[in-house]
Image (tube, helix red, strand yellow):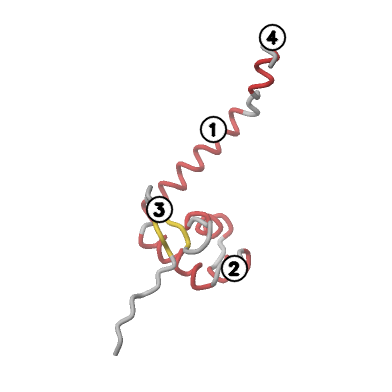
Amino acid sequence: MIAVAPTTHIRLDKSGTAWIDDTNVKVVEVILDHLAYGHSPEEVHLQHLHLSLAQVHSAFAYYFDHAEDLDAEIGRRRKMETLRAKAGEQPSRKKLQHSYGYET
């Protein structure tokens, strides 16, 4: 029998972020759909038809193997969203320059 390496559908970038192979989708993005809406892998697949069902299942498997790290990432994202919402609209550089009389 010929030994075949298993296909994981997951790759890590230089910073250790997990991505679904051949896509620009992070594993954490798929898992956020699951956590926020209670979507099963099949429902996530229906929402992201560009992902194969195998890729979605691989994202779930990766999450369950690395839940502590991904949950920490999700917590950081939520904290940043909360801080952005509290900060409100930030003035643009152009508005600041105009208000201080520095026209370009």
Q: Secondary structure at mark 3?
A: loop
Q: How far separated are the C-alphas under marks 1 and 4?
A: 30 Å
**Whole-Å distance between the Cαs marked 1 and 2?**
31 Å
Amino acid identity at mark 1: Leu
Q: Quick one: quadrant of the N terminus?
A: bottom left
Q: Which residue is mark 4?
A: 101
Residue count near mark 3 (Cα–Cα under 10 Å), binned few <14, some 14–19, many ≥20:
few
Dot 1 crowding, Cα within 10 Å, few <14, some 14–19, many 20+: few
Q: Secondary structure at mark 1?
A: helix
Question: Looking at numbered disc 2 in the image, what kind of residue is underneath it?
Answer: Glu
Crowd rating for badge 4 (residues with CA inside 10 Å; few <14, some 14–19, many 20+)? few
Q: Position of residue 6 (x, y in %)?
A: 36, 75
Q: Which residue of the protein is positioned furthest toward the front in this rendering?
A: 104
Question: Image point 54% across, 67% down: which residue?
Answer: 40
- Mark 2 highlights which residue? 43
Q: Which residue lies under the disc numbered 3?
A: 13
Q: Secondary structure at mark 2?
A: helix
